[in-house]
Every structure is written in structure tokens, then in C-alpha cells.
Image (cartoon, rainbow, N blue to C red):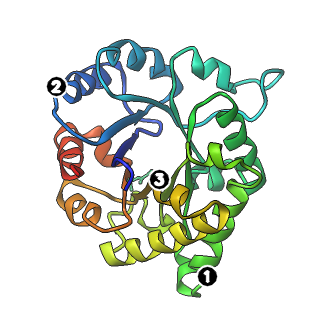
């Protein structure tokens, strides 16, 4: 079983003061899970400096797929590396929806990150309409296999998958632990097909969608839920701490 990963996704929220408070408090915790903070680009330097003597992983929320060039407003992997970024979210449903990111583009970003030894956190998940017509496995399988297409086994080992049903993100609605675990088992099965059972067992599959201190323990106790990708609650210190403590293995 992989070491649990609790990743916070601040989205376009937060500031330096909150980050400094958060890092100071999280650094003092005695937890066995891997904590990653995915902050806006503008906070990466503050995160790198303040988290230096801690085990907190430095995460970005996006990257551009090209190495460099005339892409105004974009940030490259090498620029992320300057801030010691080790993790990067790709394919978040908000990027798919608001920035028209498709599986082909997401797959390019995954490859670019792996070339620079940054762990991609590949987000996949169905919308409510897709679940209602019973297409959730087709959608998730497609996003997973397209997102991880043509990646060598050794690189797949360095990927993290986050199952985030779109209907549960920021809505206060969570999938039930059984519903989420069932999908995680399905994803694990697909990963076995892409790699083999040993590698698939090593790839952390995180759940994301309205995870809070109050529901994390039950969710994280499930056999195939290896951690959480946390949006709103990662901006609330006490809530985030409680999620982290729910993930002891
Ligand atoms: C997310 O944005 O990845 C997320 C899971 O958000 P929330 O926890 O707020 O639902």
C-alpha cells in the first residue's frame, strides 16, 4: 500500500500570511502521511523558503506543456524546478472546464513533468450528468488511459492519480466512502492493465471532493483510498490538520 498523500489545492486563494501560518503549524505536526501543498505560482517562493526544514511537499496547480517560448502568462517545468516543485496537479476539472484542457493536452503536461522528475497528480472524474446516465467508468477510464498514454513503467510509478467526481468538488456533496472506493478499485484495475499488479499497487489514488475533517477518517479507511486532494478545507488550518491526522497508516 502506498504511503498516504494529503495534498491541498489552494486554487486561486490564499496569501503569504496564511501560507506562513499554515507551514509553521504543519511543520510541527507528527504525521506519517505525505503532505503536499499546491499553491498559486505567486506563492511558490514563500512555500519553498518556509517549508525548507519540513517534510511538506511543494506543489504547483498547473504547468505549460512546452519547454519555453512565446506563451505569455504561462510557466514552464524548469521554472517550477527553480522553486523546488516536486508535485503538480494536471487535468483538474476546473482546468478542463474553464480552460478547455483536453486529454491530449493533459497527457503532454504529464510527460513534460515526468521528464523533469516532478510527480504529476492527474485528476480524473465524471460530471453528474455522466454519472446519471451510467457513464462514469467510461469517462474515468478514458481520462486515465489518455492522460497516461505512452508512459514508461518506471515513469508511471512516479504518478499520482486523484479521483475527483466533478459533482463533489466544492459542492459540499461527497461521494460515499463505498462509492469512492468502488471507483478507486476500478481505477486500480485499469492501472494494472496499463502496467502490472505490482506497479499499480504502488500508485497512490487520492479521493477529492468536499473532503473535510469530519468525513476524512471514514474515507481514508477504505482499502483503495490512498489519500486525499483537498480544496476548500486545505485553507482552514484546523480542518486540514484533522484530515492529515486521519490519514495515519
Ligand atoms: C479540488 O478542488 O480538488 C477539491 C477537491 O475541492 P473541494 O475539496 O473544495 O471540493
Viewer-side residue, 193 vs 44: 193
Q: Please determine whether, in this image, residue 134 is positioned above or below residue 211.
A: below
Between the C-alphas of marks 1 and 2, the distance is 44 Å
Badge 3 is on which residue? 202
Q: Nearer the viewer, mark 3 or mark 1?
A: 3
Badge 2 is on which residue? 28
Secondary structure beneath label 3: helix
Pinpoint residue 19: horizontal percent, then vertical percent.
Answer: 31, 24
As drawn, the label of residue 173 is none
Viewer-side residue, 212 vs 98: 212
Badge 1 is on which residue? 135
Between the C-alphas of marks 3 and 1, the distance is 27 Å
With 82 as the anchor, is 100 left or right in this view? right
Pinpoint residue 193: horizontal percent, then vertical percent.
Answer: 64, 68
Classify 10 Å Cα crowding around label 3: few (below 14), some (14-19), many (20 and above). some
Residue positioned 23% across, 40% down in the render: 32
With 65 as the anchor, is 153 left or right in this view? left
Q: Nearer the viewer, mark 2 or mark 3?
A: 3
Secondary structure beneath label 1: loop
Pinpoint residue 38: horizontal percent, then vertical percent.
Answer: 44, 35
Classify 10 Å Cα crowding around label 2: few (below 14), some (14-19), many (20 and above). few
With 188 as the anchor, is 65 left or right in this view? right
| Mark 3 / mark 1, whichever is N-terminal | 1
> Is residue 183 visible in this depiction of the protein?
yes
Residue positioned 66% across, 20% down in the render: 78
Asked if labels 2 and 1 touch by Cβ distance under 8 angstroms, the answer is: no
Residue positioned 57% across, 77% down in the render: 136
> Is residue 75 visible in this depiction of the protein?
no
| Mark 1 / mark 2, whichever is N-terminal | 2
Residue positioned 63% across, 70% down in the render: 141
Secondary structure beneath label 2: loop
Amino acid at each position: 500500500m502506498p504511503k498516504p498523500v494529503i495534498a491541498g489545492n489552494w486554487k486561486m486563494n490564499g496569501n503569504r500570511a496564511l501560507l506562513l501560518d499554515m507551514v509553521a503549524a504543519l511543520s510541527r505536526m507528527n504525521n506519517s502521511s505525505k503532505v503536499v501543498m499546491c499553491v498559486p505560482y505567486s506563492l511558490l517562493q514563500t512555500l519553498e523558503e518556509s517549508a525548507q526544514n519540513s517534510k511538506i511537499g511543494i506543489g504547483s496547480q498547473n504547468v505549460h506543456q512546452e519547454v519555453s517560448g512565446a506563451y505569455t502568462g504561462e510557466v514552464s517545468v524548469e521554472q517550477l524546478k527553480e522553486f523546488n516543485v516536486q508535485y503538480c496537479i494536471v487535468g483538474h476539472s476546473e482546468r478542463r472546464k474553464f480552460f478547455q484542457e483536453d486529454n491530449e493536452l493533459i497527457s503532454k503536461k504529464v510527460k513534460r513533468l515526468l521528464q523533469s522528475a516532478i510527480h504529476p497528480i492527474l485528476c480524473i472524474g465524471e460530471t453528474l450528468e455522466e454519472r446519471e446516465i451510467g457513464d462514469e467508468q467510461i469517462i474515468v477510464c478514458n481520462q486515465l488511459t489518455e492522460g497516461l498514454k505512452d508512459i514508461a513503467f518506471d515513469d508511471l510509478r512516479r504518478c499520482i492519480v486523484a479521483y475527483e467526481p466533478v459533482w463533489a468538488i466544492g459542492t459540499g456533496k461527497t461521494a460515499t466512502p463505498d462509492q469512492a472506493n468502488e471507483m478507486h478499485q476500478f481505477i486500480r484495475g485499469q492501472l494494472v492493465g496499463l502496467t502490472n499488479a505490482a506497479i499499480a499497487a504502488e500508485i497512490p489514488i487520492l479521493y477529492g471532493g468536499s473532503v473535510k475533517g469530519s468525513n476524512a477518517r471514514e474515507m481514508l479507511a477504505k482499502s483503495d483510498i490512498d489519500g486525499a486532494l483537498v480544496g476548500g478545507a486545505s485553507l482552514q488550518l484546523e480542518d486540514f490538520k484533522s484530515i492529515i491526522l486521519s490519514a495515519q497508516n
